[in-house]
Image: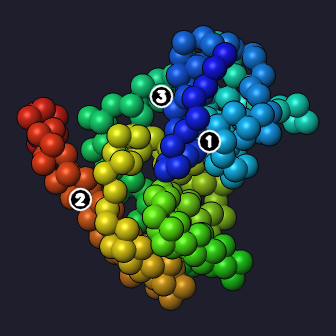
Amino acid sequence: MSFSQVKPTNLSHQISDQLVEAIKQDKLTPGQKLPSERELMETFKVGRSSVREALHSLVALKLVEVRAGKGYYVREEDRISHGKDLVQFTISEKDFLNIMEAREALEPQIARLATQRALPEDLQRLEQTYVDIQQAVTQGRYQYTEGIHLGITKATHNPVFIRLMETLLPLFPDKMRGRTIPPEEELQMHRKLIDGLSTGDGELMERLMLEHLKATRTFYMDALREESYSENPDWR
């Protein structure tokens, strides 16, 4: 089994893409143990956080499972079919609007609830996530901002919402990730969300989240039209 070294952007997503491809091509078979985190770090020439994020996304997609004290394993055939459906979903750009529709229905309500339940440590974790993204931008590296959205969800302390968002956020099509909102603009958008959470104003936070998601939808739709994706009627 051979993997190729990944590029220094979107590291976790490149890793998960290669692992998914290995599963689809049966290079990693149901029930087979994945290489250890250290082995994957050496193979892909990346840090532990990138490897763990990639593995967690595969767990969320139900392609991989964690066995306590043993590591990560490809899920058995009778348990993996749903995960394979999700993989097909992630690689189809046409499903972008479906993903955004789901997020726009779910996340504003999550954001409202989070303002009522957020603890000081939740806000501290979000601030650290923001700093990490800000530093990555300063260094010219792209870092997907799903950590902020997941952090807001975790502030609800509702395990069902958390599980839903852990499953939904990785579905954002990889080809869409490459068309990023200008970094400074994206940082400003997420700064508003963090500040809104700390106000305790549920209505304000709900409105900020919906505005953010709609702006995200508009940006990516415009980018797609510029590249003639609008020729497909599903995108109109």
**Can you say whether 64 is above or below 80 in the image?**
below
Q: Label 1 to label 3, Cα distance in Å?
A: 14 Å
Would residue 156 be seen by someone viewing this image from the given angle?
no
Q: In the image, what residue type sits under mark 2?
A: Phe
Disc 1, disc 2: CB below 8 Å? Answer: no
Residue name at image x 41 percent, y 44 percent: 172
Q: CA distance from mark 1 to mark 2?
A: 26 Å
Mark 3 burial class by Cα count in 10 Å: few <14, some 14-19, many 20+: many
Q: Point out the tag, 1 or 2, that comes first from the N-terminus.
A: 1
Q: Which residue is mark 1?
A: 54
Q: Quadrant of residue 59?
A: top right
For residue 219, the mark is 2
Task: Give amino acid for label 3.
Answer: Val
Residue 230 screen position, x and y as percent: 11, 40
Above-or-below relation of 156 to 123: above
Q: Position of residue 198 (x, y in %)?
A: 54, 85
Residue matched to label 3: 87
Q: How is the image coloured?
A: rainbow
Which residue, as the protein is rendered here, is positioned at the far bottom? Answer: 199
Residue 27: % across, % down: 63, 13
Q: Is residue 7 visible?
A: yes
Q: Residue at x 49, y 50 (%)?
A: 9
Secondary structure of residue under mark 2: helix
